[in-house]
Image (cartoon, rainbow, N blue to C red):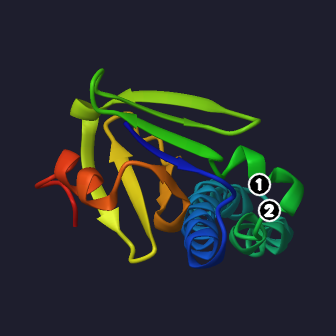
Amino acid sequence: MIVFEGQISGKCKEGVLRRGAKISFIGGLITSILFAIPTVVFAIKTDWIVLLFFLVLIPFPFLAAIPPKEKYYPTIFPSKVIIDTQTGVITTQSSQFFAESSIAEVVKVLDKGEWYLIYVKSKDGRFICQKDLLINGTLEEFEKVFKGKII
Protein backbone atom coordinates (compact mmCIF):
# COMPACT_ATOMS: atom_id res chain seq x y z
CA MET A 1 0.00 0.00 0.00
CA ILE A 2 1.26 3.44 -0.97
CA VAL A 3 -0.15 6.46 0.87
CA PHE A 4 0.34 10.18 0.24
CA GLU A 5 -1.16 12.30 3.02
CA GLY A 6 -1.07 15.98 3.91
CA GLN A 7 -1.73 19.41 2.44
CA ILE A 8 -0.46 20.00 -1.07
CA SER A 9 1.89 22.97 -1.34
CA GLY A 10 4.57 24.67 -3.40
CA LYS A 11 5.05 23.83 -7.06
CA CYS A 12 2.42 21.12 -6.87
CA LYS A 13 -0.27 23.58 -5.77
CA GLU A 14 0.86 26.13 -8.36
CA GLY A 15 0.83 23.50 -11.12
CA VAL A 16 -2.65 22.26 -10.28
CA LEU A 17 -4.03 25.80 -10.06
CA ARG A 18 -2.34 26.73 -13.36
CA ARG A 19 -3.81 23.63 -15.02
CA GLY A 20 -7.26 24.51 -13.67
CA ALA A 21 -6.95 28.11 -14.87
CA LYS A 22 -5.96 26.95 -18.34
CA ILE A 23 -8.93 24.55 -18.55
CA SER A 24 -11.29 27.26 -17.25
CA PHE A 25 -9.94 29.80 -19.76
CA ILE A 26 -10.50 27.38 -22.67
CA GLY A 27 -14.00 26.56 -21.39
CA GLY A 28 -14.81 30.27 -21.04
CA LEU A 29 -13.45 30.98 -24.52
CA ILE A 30 -15.56 28.22 -26.08
CA THR A 31 -18.63 29.49 -24.23
CA SER A 32 -17.99 33.05 -25.41
CA ILE A 33 -17.61 31.90 -29.01
CA LEU A 34 -20.82 29.87 -28.79
CA PHE A 35 -22.70 32.94 -27.55
CA ALA A 36 -20.96 35.26 -30.03
CA ILE A 37 -22.22 33.40 -33.11
CA PRO A 38 -25.95 33.88 -32.42
CA THR A 39 -25.22 37.43 -31.24
CA VAL A 40 -23.71 38.32 -34.63
CA VAL A 41 -26.58 36.65 -36.48
CA PHE A 42 -29.12 38.48 -34.32
CA ALA A 43 -27.26 41.79 -34.83
CA ILE A 44 -27.29 41.34 -38.62
CA LYS A 45 -31.03 40.60 -38.64
CA THR A 46 -32.05 43.35 -36.20
CA ASP A 47 -29.76 46.16 -35.13
CA TRP A 48 -25.99 46.53 -34.76
CA ILE A 49 -26.44 47.84 -31.22
CA VAL A 50 -26.85 44.19 -30.17
CA LEU A 51 -23.08 43.83 -30.68
CA LEU A 52 -22.65 45.64 -27.35
CA PHE A 53 -23.29 42.22 -25.85
CA PHE A 54 -19.67 41.46 -26.83
CA LEU A 55 -18.61 43.68 -23.94
CA VAL A 56 -19.88 40.91 -21.68
CA LEU A 57 -18.41 38.06 -23.75
CA ILE A 58 -14.87 39.39 -24.11
CA PRO A 59 -13.85 39.31 -20.41
CA PHE A 60 -15.66 36.02 -19.73
CA PRO A 61 -12.68 33.66 -20.45
CA PHE A 62 -10.39 35.81 -18.31
CA LEU A 63 -12.88 35.89 -15.43
CA ALA A 64 -13.29 32.11 -15.67
CA ALA A 65 -9.52 31.67 -15.27
CA ILE A 66 -9.28 33.56 -11.97
CA PRO A 67 -7.86 31.18 -9.33
CA PRO A 68 -10.28 30.05 -6.64
CA LYS A 69 -10.19 31.42 -3.10
CA GLU A 70 -8.32 29.40 -0.51
CA LYS A 71 -11.54 28.33 1.20
CA TYR A 72 -12.37 26.25 -1.92
CA TYR A 73 -9.05 24.35 -1.93
CA PRO A 74 -10.56 21.28 -0.19
CA THR A 75 -12.76 20.81 -3.28
CA ILE A 76 -9.68 20.79 -5.53
CA PHE A 77 -6.74 19.32 -3.63
CA PRO A 78 -6.77 15.86 -2.08
CA SER A 79 -5.53 15.48 1.46
CA LYS A 80 -5.00 11.74 1.04
CA VAL A 81 -4.26 9.44 -1.91
CA ILE A 82 -4.15 5.69 -1.26
CA ILE A 83 -2.86 3.22 -3.83
CA ASP A 84 -3.80 -0.25 -2.61
CA THR A 85 -1.67 -2.67 -4.61
CA GLN A 86 -3.42 -5.72 -3.17
CA THR A 87 -6.95 -4.75 -4.23
CA GLY A 88 -5.83 -2.70 -7.26
CA VAL A 89 -7.74 0.41 -6.18
CA ILE A 90 -6.66 4.06 -6.05
CA THR A 91 -8.55 6.33 -3.67
CA THR A 92 -8.32 10.11 -3.43
CA GLN A 93 -10.11 12.19 -0.84
CA SER A 94 -10.35 15.42 1.06
CA SER A 95 -12.93 16.83 3.45
CA GLN A 96 -15.05 17.79 0.40
CA PHE A 97 -14.74 14.86 -2.03
CA PHE A 98 -14.01 11.18 -2.44
CA ALA A 99 -13.08 9.39 -5.69
CA GLU A 100 -12.03 5.85 -6.42
CA SER A 101 -10.67 4.10 -9.50
CA SER A 102 -8.91 0.87 -10.29
CA ILE A 103 -5.22 0.79 -11.14
CA ALA A 104 -6.18 -0.89 -14.44
CA GLU A 105 -8.05 2.30 -15.44
CA VAL A 106 -4.90 4.44 -15.19
CA VAL A 107 -4.12 5.87 -18.62
CA LYS A 108 -0.91 7.72 -17.77
CA VAL A 109 1.05 9.18 -14.89
CA LEU A 110 2.78 12.52 -15.43
CA ASP A 111 5.94 12.98 -13.39
CA LYS A 112 6.06 16.71 -12.71
CA GLY A 113 9.29 16.57 -10.69
CA GLU A 114 7.98 17.19 -7.17
CA TRP A 115 4.63 15.48 -7.79
CA TYR A 116 2.70 12.99 -9.88
CA LEU A 117 -0.59 13.54 -11.70
CA ILE A 118 -2.46 10.30 -12.35
CA TYR A 119 -4.90 10.28 -15.29
CA VAL A 120 -7.65 7.66 -15.28
CA LYS A 121 -10.25 6.75 -17.91
CA SER A 122 -13.01 8.54 -15.98
CA LYS A 123 -11.09 11.83 -16.46
CA ASP A 124 -10.94 12.51 -12.73
CA GLY A 125 -7.98 14.87 -12.25
CA ARG A 126 -7.82 14.70 -8.49
CA PHE A 127 -5.27 11.92 -8.25
CA ILE A 128 -2.45 14.27 -7.25
CA CYS A 129 0.51 12.79 -5.36
CA GLN A 130 3.08 15.21 -3.94
CA LYS A 131 6.29 13.21 -3.47
CA ASP A 132 7.26 14.68 -0.10
CA LEU A 133 3.84 13.74 1.34
CA LEU A 134 4.56 10.02 0.97
CA ILE A 135 3.96 8.41 4.38
CA ASN A 136 3.67 4.73 3.46
CA GLY A 137 5.55 2.88 0.71
CA THR A 138 8.34 4.19 -1.49
CA LEU A 139 8.60 6.14 -4.72
CA GLU A 140 10.29 3.11 -6.29
CA GLU A 141 7.25 1.01 -5.38
CA PHE A 142 4.98 3.69 -6.88
CA GLU A 143 6.98 3.69 -10.12
CA LYS A 144 6.91 -0.10 -10.21
CA VAL A 145 3.09 -0.12 -9.95
CA PHE A 146 2.76 2.32 -12.86
CA LYS A 147 5.68 1.03 -14.94
CA GLY A 148 5.20 1.90 -18.61
CA LYS A 149 2.63 4.61 -17.85
CA ILE A 150 4.91 7.23 -16.29
CA ILE A 151 5.76 10.10 -18.62
Quadrant (top left/top right/bottom left/bottom right) for the N terminus: top left
What's under tag 2, amino acid-wise? Pro
- Residue 150 location in percent, x, y? 22, 61
Most distant residue in the top direction: 87
Q: Identify the residue shown where x is 59% and y is 55%.
A: 34
Which class describes the residues within 10 Å of circle 2: few (<14), some (14-19), or many (20+)? few
Q: Is residue 34 left or right of residue 74?
A: left
Q: Nearer the viewer, residue 63 or 80?
A: 80
Find disc 2 in the rendering and name its residue.
Answer: 68
Quadrant (top left/top right/bottom left/bottom right) for the C terminus: bottom left
Q: Is residue 2 left or right of residue 128?
A: left
Q: Nearer the viewer, residue 148 or 75?
A: 148
* SS for dot 2: loop
- Residue 32 location in percent, x, y? 65, 62
**Discs 2/1, front:** 1
What's under tag 1, amino acid-wise? Tyr
Relative vertical location of residue 16 with respect to residue 148 in this rendering, above or below:
below
Residue 17: name its quadrant: bottom right
- Residue 103 location in percent, x, y? 27, 34
Q: Identify the residue shown where x is 62% and y is 47%.
A: 78
The alpha-carbon separation of the residues under discs 2 and 1 comes to: 7 Å
Q: Is residue 149 left or right of residue 105?
A: left
Which of disc 1 and disc 2 is earlier in sequence?
A: 2
Q: Nearer the viewer, residue 64 or 141?
A: 141
Residue 73: which disc? 1
Residue 99: which disc? none
Q: Evaluate if marks 2 and 1 touch, with contact meaning CB atoms under 8 Å apart.
A: yes
- Residue 143 location in percent, x, y? 23, 56
Q: Identify the residue shown where x is 54% and y is 68%.
A: 19
* SS for dot 1: helix
